[in-house]
Amino acid sequence: MQRFFVKPEQMNKDILVICGEDYNHIRNVLRMKQGEEVLVCDGSDKEYLCQIIAYNIEEEIVELKVTDIFGNARELPTRITLFQGYPKGDKMETIVQKAVELGVHEIVPVMMKRSIVKLDSKKAAKKVDRFNGIALSAAKQSKRGIIPEVKEVMSFQEAVAYAEQMEYVLLPYEQAEGMEYSRGLLQAAKGKDSIAVFIGPEGGFEPSEVSMIEAIGGNTLSLGHRILRTETAGMTILSLLMFLLEEE
């Protein structure tokens, strides 16, 4: 069944109004007819089964009637923020897509000392717009209850200040202690309200950056005896956390 996201203000009691690109997709691409059903989520913990009741061609909106309401069990009980060291090429697009599929709550691109790419504010804003479009598509595909936001590109100092507000901070690092210690850190993530995960760019972290994370109570851990690419490291720890945190 097709699934769409709306803003809370698009709800009017038991009637939903969909417009913009989704209107075009429903009417002109999917060619859905009155009486057909779709699933709709407004970013809360609820999911709505809706029936198409009318098209308003002049205003380019489709009206839907809510026929049933479900609790949304697809979100993790812990909000995970991925702080991704900005990589080169189109790797960030893949990272955003896969992180959303794995249940991340939000993604923060971070310019770190070893980041190869340099972005001015205009380029950065354009990139973030594209990343949020990818997040939306991935959220629909994986049937998420929310659309994870890709934040504006931050400096490392800004990212650390933001992460300091979170309950638990993890940083995969090749010089971290062994696997038993790291398993303990992952197990300790259970029950936390919010988790920050820092991933370095292609060149990894500068020691001074690791020290800054440790200064706010962050924990370094190992993901094994192999050196992982930046686009692999984040997916690895998110997969582990998803498995540990997923509710029955």
Image: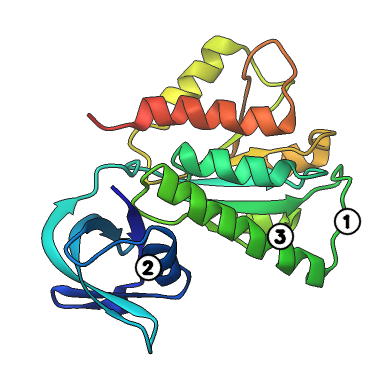
Query: According to the image, label 1 marks what residue?
Result: 118
Q: Residue at 80% of width from left, 72% of height from top? A: 122
One can see residue 152 in this view: no
Specify the label residue 154 is tagged with: 3
Comparing marks 1 and 2, which lies closer to the viewer? 2
| Residue type, label 2 | Arg
Dot 3: element: strand
Comparing marks 3 and 1, which lies closer to the viewer? 1
Residue 243 in picture, x, y percent from top left: 39, 25
Dot 2: element: helix
3D distance between C-alphas at marks 3 and 1: 12 Å
Viewer-proximal residue, 94 or 22?
A: 22
Dot 1: element: loop
Would residue 235 be found to the left or right of residue 120 on screen?
left
Which mark is first along the chain, 2 or 1?
A: 2
> Badge 1: how crowded within 10 Å, few (<14), some, or many (20+)?
few
Q: In which quarter of the image is residue 175?
A: top right
Residue 69 in picture, x, y percent from top left: 13, 57
Which mark is first along the chain, 3 or 2?
A: 2
Query: According to the image, label 2 marks what residue?
Result: 27
| Residue type, label 1 | Lys
Q: Residue at 38% of width from left, 57% of height from top? A: 30
238 versus 91 height, above or below = above
Residue 209 in picture, x, y percent from top left: 77, 42
